[in-house]
Image (tube, rainbow, N blue to C red):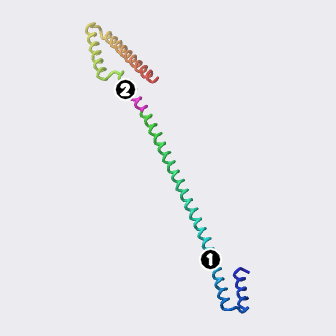
Amino acid sequence: MSENDNFREEFRHELNSRWTTEQLRELIESVARERDRRYADTFDSLRREMAAGFAAAKEAVASALAAAKEAVNAAFLAAKEAITKSEIASEKRFESINEFREQLKDQQSTFVTRDLFDVHEKRLAQLERNEGRIQGGSEEQRGSRLQQNFNISTLIALIALGIVVINFLSQKH
C-alpha cells in the first residue's frame, strides 16, 4: 500500500470512532498543512534542480563560447601567419626574378648591337672591294680572298660568342 492509501485508511478509522466537529476540523487542517508542506518541498526541490540545471547550462554555454573564441583566434593567427609566409615567399621569388633580369641586362650589354654589326659589315664589304681593286687580281684570287675574309669573320664571331658564354657562366657562379 502507498502512503496515501495508509493515510486514507487511517482517516476513515478515525472518522468512524466518533470524532467531534472540532477534532475533524483540526484533523483536516493538519492534513492540509501536511499536504501544503509536501507540495512546497516538492516545488522547492524542483526550483533548486531547475536553478542548478540553468546554472550548468549557462556555464556550458559560456565554456563553449570561450572555446569557440579561442578557436577563432587560433584560426585567425594561423591565417595571418600563412599570409606572412606567402608574402615572404613572393618577395623572394620576385627578388630572384629581378636578379635574373639584371643578369640578362648585364649579358645583353656585352652583345653587339644590330646597328654596330651592320656598320661593321658594310665597312668590311667596302674594304674587301677596295682590296680587290688595289690588288686587281684574278677572279680566282678574289674568290680565295673572299673565302679567307669569310673565314676570318666567322672566327671573330665565334671568339665573340665564346667570350659572351664565358661572361654568362662566370656571372652565374
Is 99 in the magenta? yes
Nearer-the-camera pick, 31 or 91: 31
Q: Quarter-wise, where is residue 145 in the image?
A: top left
Residue at image mark 2: 105
Which quarter of the rendering shows the N terminus? bottom right
Q: Image point 52% across, 50% down: which residue?
A: 70
**Please, what secondary structure does the residue beneath circle 2 have?**
helix
Which residues lie in the magenta part?
95-102
Residue 40 lies left or right of residue 10; in this view the side is left
Spatial distance from mark 1 to mark 2, Cα to Cα?
Answer: 97 Å
In the rendered image, the vertical position of residue 96 relative to residue 165, given as above or below: below
The numbered mark, 1 or 2, whose residue comes first in the sequence reads: 1
Is 73 in the magenta? no
Q: Quarter-wise, where is residue 126 in the image?
A: top left
* Amino acid on which disc 1 is placed: Tyr
Nearer-the-camera pick, 25 or 118: 25
